[in-house]
Image (cartoon, grey):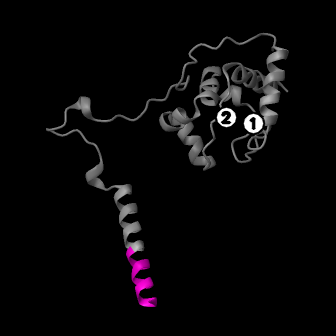
Amino acid sequence: MKQMRTKSILTATALMASIVLYSCGGESDKKEETAETPASMVEEAPVANDKGIGKFQNVELTNPLDEGMIATGKNVYDVKCAACHKLTGEKLVGPGWEDVTERRTPEWIMNFVTNVDEMLEKDPESQAMLEICMVRMPNQNLSDDEARGTLEFMRQNDMQ
């Protein structure tokens, strides 16, 4: 019985190792342009876009800051963001929010918080953050108004 269990464990281990090796791929899995593969079929890496990926392509900022939006954003931060993000530059689970509005465009921020899954899959800047933080941000299902309020709250935070 013990010998049978050991054999099952070894078989399962070998199977898992095969799956890992296969999924990691090798040189033959890389897509390269060859005489048989036209250029139109070669997969290209995503191009960095300072607006990110999503529906927000032109976010109009308020001047002065909108207190109602700030209140909405602070509420969103307190309920959905504070567990992982500090308002300083210090990393908690995710990056700190200090100076985020100086590093990212309003459109990129809005697209990230409302379209996090696609941004993490396709946006090079989001992927770079994921490599640093090592934790995928969950989709918080923010409405457009909540996202805009969050952006306004971030703007206020960066002005302090």
Residue 50: image quadrant is top right
In contact (CB < 8 Å): disc 1 and disc 2: yes
Instruction: Residue at 79%, 35% (x, y): give it.
Output: 79
Is 113 positioned to the left or the right of 155 in the image? left
Give the residue at x 81% y 14%: 66
The residue that appears at 62% across and 48% down in the rendered structure is 135
Tell me where residue 159 appears, x and y as whole percent: 82, 24
**CA separation in Å, label 1 and label 2:** 7 Å
In the image as oriented, which residue stretches furthest toward the front?
1
Location of mark 2 (residue): 140
Location of residue 133 with respect to 66 vertically, above or below: below
| Residue 18 as seen in the image, left or right of residue 53 | left
8 within the magenta span: yes
Query: Which span is picked out in magenta?
Result: 1-11
| Residue with the most extreme bottom position | 2
**35 left or right of 136 in image:** left
Looking at marks 1 and 2 on the same chain, the residue that comes earlier in the sequence is marked by: 1
